Amino acid sequence: MAADPSILANLADSFASAWQYLIEPIVQTPWANWKGFWLERIFDDRFVVIYYLPLLPILLLLRRRQLRVGLVLTGLVFLAYVCGVLYAALWLITCVLFHRLGERFAIECKRSDVLPIGPPLAAATIVGGWYVVTMLLHNLMLPTELNAWLFHNLPWLYPLGARGVSWEPCFRLLHATRGSGGPFQLVAAMFWNVHNIGTAYLAVRMLHYLSEIKRDTLPRSRRTLLNFLAYVCYGPSLIQGPIERFEPFQEQIDTCHERRHWQNLPPGLYRIGLGVLKSLISTWYFIPLLENQLGIGVDNRYYDHPEQIESFWMLYFGVFLQIFWLYLEFSGYCDIAIGTSRLFGYRQVENFRMPWLATSLRDFWRRWHISLSAILRDYVYIALGGNRRHVTLNLCLTFFLCGIWHFLTPQVGIWGIVMGLMIAVNQGWVRWMKRIDENPTSRLATIRRACGRLRPLPQICAWLITQHVFVFSLLIFFGGHGVITVPREIIRRIVAWLS
C-alpha cells in the first residue's frame, strides 16, 4: 500500500526543521571571535578552569620534591588571574588559618578534660560561620568613589569577569551594583557565587579533613602545611571539585611521576574536549531555550507565571531543561578538571556516572555529584547514626545540610527535607521487597516474580518514576512556589485538553 504523500511531506518538513534547529547555531557561531564568544560565552562560569592549562607545563617540569610547591603557586596564580589578586591573597590566608585550626583541633580532640562534643562543635561553628560570611559578603558595598579608584588604579584586585570579560549570565546580575556606569563593586564581584570561587568546596574539604583528624587517621607527619596547601590549592579541582580526599590526594601526588606517559595524552585531551563540547551544547541549545522561552534567569516567568508559557511541552519539560543544562555545565567542568589532571599523571575521582540512567533515588545519588554525596554520607549521615537508628531523621538532616550548603534560603532547606523523605520511602520499599523475597511462597512473592518476568517494563517504570520524582522536586529548589504554580498549570492544561 502506497504511503500518503501528505504524511511523507510532513515528515520531510519535520526532519528539515529539526536539522535547521540543530545546524543553525553551529553555522552562526563566531568561531574566530576569541573574546566575545570563547571567553565570554564558552570559557565562563565554571569553565574558567581552562585558564589553568597554560600552567600545566610548569608542573610537568618540576621534580617530585618540588611538585607540591608548584601546585600551591600555580593554584594561587590561577586564582589571582581569574578571581583577582586580593581574592588569591585571602584564599591563602584562609587556608593557612584552617591548617592551624586543624592542628589545634587535633590537640583538643585528645584532651580528656573537655566534653567529646566540644571540639567538633567549635570547629563546625568556625568553618560554618566562615562559610556563611562568605555567602553574605556578596552584599557588601564599598563607597562608590573608593570602588572607582580601586578599579581604575588597581584593576587586578577584581575578578576577570568584572575587569573586562563579562561572563553571561553570571555577571549580568552585578550590573545592578554599578553606579552611574561605574565599575563592578569589588567585594560583590569577588564573592558573586561561593559555588564558583572555591569556598563552598573548601568548606566540604574541611568537613572531611577535620573528621579524619577526629578519627586519628591522618598522622602529624602527613599534615604539614605544604601538604595541606597543595590539597586546597590544587587548581583543576579548586573551584568546584571533584572533591578528592586528603590521603588519596597525597598518595596520587606522591606517585604521579610514575604514571606520566604519552599514553595519558589522548584520554586527557579527550576529556578536556568533551568538557568544551558540553559548554558549546549548553550555549547553542539550552541557554536560548531557558532565557528566551522560559525566562529563567531573566524574569523567571516559568516559575512565577507559568500560564505565559505557550507550549505545553515546554511547560512540562522546563525544569528538565534547567537541570540538564546544569548537568552539562557541571559535568563539563569536571571533564576538563579530570582531563587536565590526567595529563600530568594524577587520576581524579569521577563525579558523575550517567545519573540519567538511575532507576532509584538511592542509585541516582550514587551517580550524581559522587564526591559530595560520598562525603555527606560518610561524615554526616553515618555520623548521625546512618541505618542503625532514626534513619528518616538522619536522611532529612543530611539533605537539609546539602540544600543549605547550596543556598541559604528556606526553599532549598525544604527541598533537602523532601529529598530525605523520598529516599527514606525508597529505602523502605527496598526493605519491604527483601521481606517479600524471604517468603517465596507468599502471594506477594508470586506477584513480584511475575512482574519480574515482564522485563524491561519494571525497569522502565522505575526509571521514569525516579527521573520525574527527582526532577520535579527541583521545582522547590529552583522555583520555590513554582512547586505549586507549575504542576497546577500542567494539570489545568491536561484537564482542558481532555474536556
Image (cartoon, rainbow, N blue to C red):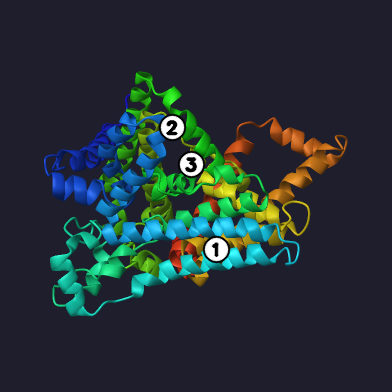
**Numbered disc 2: secondary structure:** loop
Residue 130 point in image, percent of width and height: 48, 67
Front residue of 65/396: it is 65
Residue 449's place in the image compared with 380, above or below, is: above
- Badge number at residue 149: none
Q: Residues within 10 Å of mark 2 (few under 14, many from 20)?
A: many
Instruction: Check the picture and name the quadrant holding the N terminus.
Output: top left
Where in the figure is residue 411, as x and y percent of width and height? 50, 69
Please tell me the numbered disc located at residue 351: 3
Label 3 – label 1 distance at C-alpha: 22 Å
Badge 1: few (under 14), some or many (20 or more) residues near its Cα, within 10 Å?
many
Q: Residue furthest left?
A: 32
User: Identity of the amino acid at label 2?
Assistant: Tyr
Q: Are marks 3 and 1 in contact (CB under 8 Å)?
A: no
Residue wearing tag 2: 346
- Identify the amino acid type marked 3: Asn
Q: Does residue 159 appear to the left or right of 196 in the view shown?
A: left
Residue sitting at x 47%, y 65%: 131
For marks 1 and 2, the one nearer the N-term is: 2
Q: Is residue 346 above or below residue 164?
A: above
| Quadrant housing residue 221 | top right
Of 400 and 374, nearer the camera is 374
- Rounded to the nearest angstrom, the CA distance separating label 3 from label 2 is 15 Å
> Residue at the location (42% across, 33% down)?
65
Kind of element beneath mark 1 = helix
The residue tagged with tag 3: helix, strand or loop?
loop
User: Which mark is nearer the camera, 3 or 1?
Assistant: 3
Q: From this viewpoint, is residue 332 visible?
A: no
Q: Residue at x 33, y 34 (%)?
A: 59
Residue that badge 1 annotates: 415
Amino acid type of the residue that numbered disc 1 sits on in the rendered structure: Trp
